[in-house]
Structures are given as C-alpha cells and as structure tokens.
C-alpha cells in the first residue's frame, strides 16, 4: 500500500505539471491535428483513380493513420530526460533513499505526464474521427466493439513495452553519460519499423524482414491490425508479453549495473 500511495503521488505531481500551462495544453490539439490533416490529403491523392493499395481501401488507410496517431507518442521508446538529469546531476542519490524503487517512481511520473497528453490526443482523435465519418472518409460499419476492446488491451501492453524500453535507454546514461545519440537512433528507426510512418505492407521486402526481428512492429502496426481484424488477439498477445519480459529484463540489468556503478563512484 505504501508503494501505491507513493506512485499515486508521483502521478498527481506529473499531472499538475502537465496541466499547469493551459495555453500550451490547448495548442496541443492543433499540433496533433494539422500533420494528420495533411496525411489525409496525401493519401486521398494517392488513392485517386484506384480502389485499393496493398489490401487497404482509402477508408481503411485513413483509419490506420487515426489509430497510429493515437498510439505513436505513447508507445515510442525515448530518452526520459528527468531520469537522465537525475543520473548526471547526482540527484539520484536522494531518490535512492526513498522507500519506493527509483524505476517504479520514474514509471509513475511517466504515466502521470502521459495521462495528460492522452486526454488531449483522445479528444483530438475523437473529433477528427467524427469529422472524417461525416465527410465519408471513415466507414464505422467496419468497426467492432470486440476488436476495439482487444485493441485497448494490446495498446496497454504496447505502452508498457515502450515504457520499459524508454527506461532501458535512459539507464544507458550510467555508462555513456549522454544517451541522446541512442535516443535519436531509436527515434529515427521507430517510425519506419513500427508502421507509424507507413504501413509495413508497403515497405520493401528486405525492410520487412529486418522489422520482424525488432519489437517496434508490435507497438503500432500489430495493434492496428487487431483493431481492423487483420490479426487475431491471440496472435499478437504472446509476442507483446514476450517483448515486455525482455524489455523488463534489459531495463533491470542496466539499472542494477548502473546503480552499482553510481554507488561506487558517488559513495
């Protein structure tokens, strides 16, 4: 119960910080909506004169990018700058005195800050989807409550994998002093191999083969396939659980080795 109370405090702190600047909060809607609007016009031009592309109709392609918009920022592995700053500045020493393990505290803070953004993205995606249905760009008849529930489950697991990979990238600061280079590499390859930039079906065959050995496809592309009915939940769930375990193991090993290194140098 003590851990729960402390994590709730971390979540509340991150939530207050995320909503403190109301103008920035409101502008987030515009920042999310504009790039997506450009993508809709782009694919409308691509589908001009053709009924389908790699098995996607225009309506299904638009639905694909709506879901990619919802997923991307929450599942993308990235450098957690507060973790990196704690390690580089030495503030980690104060955190090590707390009763809750630092990785759990960091996860609580991350969840709190993302919860604010999730509200913004969900509202924006909901409004965009409604407009697209009105315009005839989306066909709600292709949706299913059962598949939507399955999608929410894999979304949650994909978020967990992304968080664990983010912790692993951040704990690399123990050994490199600056993990921004690694973060930039991940930020470059993730959109491509996750399917957020373009559906993996449209990539060259050799890139699809490389992508099969990376966790990224399971964070965006496969959850979308679950929602659209192109993949079954039981086909995606085992892989996501396996990657969650591997990411947790990697983050734990880096943390334990980094903590020992930090204590030895700082002690």
Image: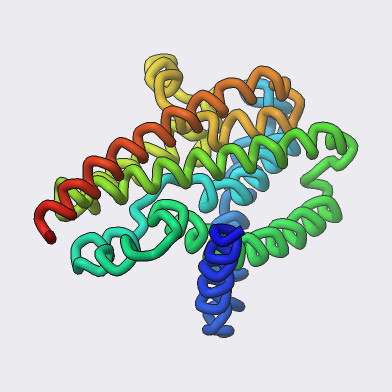
Q: Is residue 28 visible?
A: yes
The image's colouring method is rainbow
Q: Quadrant of the C terminus?
A: bottom left
Left or right: 100 in relation to 134: left
* Count of marks, rendered view: 0
Left or right: 234 in relation to 254: right
Q: Can you say whether 81 is above or below 166 in the image?
A: below
x and y, in percent, of residue 116 in the image: 60, 67
Q: Residue at x 48, y 29 (%)?
A: 245
In the picture as drawn, the residue positioned furthest to the left comes out as 265
x and y, in percent, of residue 114 in the image: 55, 61
Q: Quadrant of residue 152?
A: top right
In-front residue for pair 119/17: 17
Left or right: 181 in relation to 198: left
Q: Quadrant of the N terminus?
A: bottom right
Q: Residue at x 28, y 42 (%)?
A: 256
Q: Quadrant of residue 149?
A: top right
Q: Can you say whether 151 is above or below 98 in the image?
A: above
Left or right: 86 in relation to 124: left
Q: Quadrant of residue 206?
A: top left
x and y, in percent, of residue 68 in the image: 60, 44
Q: Residue at x 12, y 52 (%)?
A: 264
In-front residue for pair 58/108: 108
Q: Is residue 34 visible?
A: no
x and y, in percent, of residue 198 in the image: 52, 35
In-front residue for pair 146/207: 146
In-front residue for pair 150/12: 12
Q: Residue at x 39, y 64 (%)?
A: 98
């Amino acid at each position: 119960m003590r851990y729960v109370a402390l994590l709730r405090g971390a979540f509340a702190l991150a939530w207050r910080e995320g909503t403190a600047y109301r103008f920035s909060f409101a502008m987030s809607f515009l920042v999310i909506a504009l790039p997506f609007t450009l993508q809709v016009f782009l694919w409308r031009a691509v589908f001009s004169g053709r009924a389908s592309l790699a098995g996607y109709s225009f309506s299904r392609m638009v639905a694909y990018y709506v879901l990619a918009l919802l997923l991307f920022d929450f599942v993308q592995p990235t450098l957690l700058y507060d973790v990196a700053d704690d390690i580089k500045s030495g503030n980690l020493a104060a955190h090590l005195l707390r009763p809750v393990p630092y990785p759990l505290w960091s996860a609580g803070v991350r969840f709190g800050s993302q919860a604010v953004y999730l509200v913004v993205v969900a509202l924006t995606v909901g409004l965009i989807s409604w407009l697209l249905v009105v315009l005839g760009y989306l066909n709600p008849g292709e949706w299913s409550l059962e598949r939507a529930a399955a999608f929410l489950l894999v979304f949650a697991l994909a978020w967990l994998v992304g968080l664990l990979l983010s912790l692993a990238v951040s704990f690399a600061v123990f050994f490199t002093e600056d993990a921004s280079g690694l973060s930039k590499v991940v930020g470059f390859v993730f959109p491509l191999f996750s399917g957020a930039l373009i559906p993996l079906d449209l990539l060259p065959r050799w890139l699809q083969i490389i992508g099969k050995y990376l966790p990224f496809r399971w964070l965006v592309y496969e959850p979308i396939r679950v929602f659209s009915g192109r993949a079954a939940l039981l086909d995606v769930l085992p892989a996501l659980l396996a990657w969650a375990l591997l990411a947790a193991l990697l983050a734990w090993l880096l943390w334990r080795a980094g903590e020992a290194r930090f204590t030895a140098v700082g002690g």
